[in-house]
Image: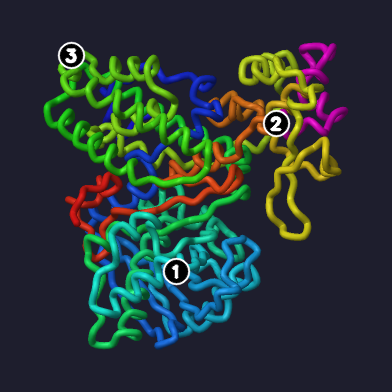
Amino acid sequence: MSGHATDTDIKEAALRPPEQVMRLARLGSLHQCRLSFMRQLTRRLAREDWQFTRRAFEVDDNGVGHAVYTATGPERSYSLIAFAHDLPDHLRSDRVIAEAWDATFALFDGVPDRADIARLSRNVPMQEAGRISESELSLSRANRSVRLWTHVVDRLSQGQQPDPQTIAEVGYLMRTTAVYGSGKFGAADRDVIAERPEMAAPFQAEMLSVYLTRWFVRDMVEHMARVQGGENAVALDPALARRLGIGNSTGLGMAPFLVNHPMLVNNWILVRETALARVRALPSATPDAVALFRDLLSRSVAAIETWRTEHPIQLARLADLRADLSRLLPHVSDGLDTDHPWDKLHAWAEGNLSFEGQEFLVSLMLEPYGDIIDGLGPCMAAVEQAGFRIDGSMPLHQVKALIEQQFPWALETDWTAPEATARAWYVSEEKLEPRLGQRHEEPIAPYEQPLAPGRDAAFLHADLGDWPGDTLLAAFLLKHPEHRHSARRVQIAAKAPYGEIRDNTIGADMLPIDMLRAKLSFFGATSFDPRPDRWIRITMFAGAPYPPELTGDNADFWVYPESDI
């Protein structure tokens, strides 16, 4: 794997093995890094000098109407079409089954005309109940944080700025409850945009949608302040505005993603591990690299002090992280002028820091080295159809060997123990939402989703039994078609070893928030706040410049805030 086509001379240390990296406790300790999808987006937009235009803002005094924001790059334009609604408080819900929202959005491929806006105005506000077309790349919706929204509107309408502490406590004026892409509800399939350079990395359309949504939200809160205060109203101070991100409430629906997309997840983790290996292999650290690392570490300490949660597990993890950073600060004050400093620092962290601290350090170590890391971004995408075909010509002795290599922990698990199979994933018929139930207390086993690859691989291994080793897999699957999905995953794991979680996803002690946290860290989320262990609130683009302010100087390290109030 190479960051750039010509980077054949880049050296890499040994990758951390999948059995170390792919444990749920470690995955649940991942943090954003310079490879996160939000930061890939803002760097590209700045590097390529994208231009941003607010083409329309037709919102009335009741906060009802539409707005259009366009991002124009070297080859194409993309437009966020936002619909603002006057939503009664009793209808405001973050549940995926909600039917009304404060705002709804579509990311349009190009620049919409009046006919496009009229068509979308009949469908986008309905979300799942409507239909969009291949001209749209994403569909989303958001609700206000009522307390902060009211506070900001009241203050601005009176000619005053909102209280910085109140902003810090919430962190966003609106939170998305879903951002759909990749063919959902008629939107363009991933294949439509996958070859476009600006969309090569994963989730770039969705991240662009959220980035433009944040611009719309600022405009909306200022508009409502002018409606309320007239000539007395003032605009939001730019420094305060930058502190505001877009919130997100993510529940169990996202957790199965890590299981259902092994090739994609493999590429995410493999790229991050490759980036780490490149940094660890560096024989020395330049003064500029060390200065940047120490600066971002100091800024991180201050930022993490502002993170808030009431969840006991996250409280403990935050305490661990803060303690880890306090240990790290003196350790790096004068310890980076040795040979292979990053490799030594990483080894020290593995022996002295918690998973939280270790993984936060990994993120920080990558920061000074965009020249050898950033080119890896497009490698994080995957053509998942390539892994769907089962190689039926593989002999069974090879299948068994692959299971023993990739799933040793599963073969050592006693799957007859009640605690090993305490949970079952299923889809609620009434709500059409993923659920995680208690297998031995609820009649849900017949409806279980195939989200326990370790158990299923162990069952496949057992059923291979005394079959002759030279028997072809195709012959075995004719007799045991129930093992087709496991055979496919075993063969995928041979090519994508970082695609399998090396833990029991249906065990009594499994924490779904670990899976949520892992995925959200790659998006670039911060301020993780579980509620309780099955959904999580996070913030996106907090600290980022707004599109009209974006430059090469502020496009990257905005995620590490500086005090500017």
Q: Quadrant of residue 452?
A: top right
Q: Which residue is mark 2?
A: 508
Between 133 and 427, the residue placed more toward the observer is: 427
Q: Residue at x 69, y 54 (%)?
A: 433
Question: What color scheme is it?
Answer: rainbow
Tell me if 37 is positioned left or right of 279 in this view: right
CB-based contact (under 8 Å), mark 2 and mark 1: no
Q: Residue at x 82, y 33 (%)?
A: 482
Between 283 and 174, the residue placed more toward the observer is: 174
x and y percentages locating residue 45 in the rendered image = 28, 56
Tell me if 409 is positioned left or right of 66 in this view: right
x and y percentages locating residue 400 in the rendered image = 71, 16
Q: What is the secondary structure assignment of the residue under circle 3?
A: loop
Q: Which residues are magenta?
A: 461-488
Q: Residue at x 81, y 28 (%)?
A: 477
Amino acid carrying label 1: it is Phe
Q: Which residue is mark 1?
A: 108
Amino acid carrying label 2: it is Ala
Q: Which residue is mark 3?
A: 338
Between marks 2 and 1, how big is the CA–CA gap? 44 Å
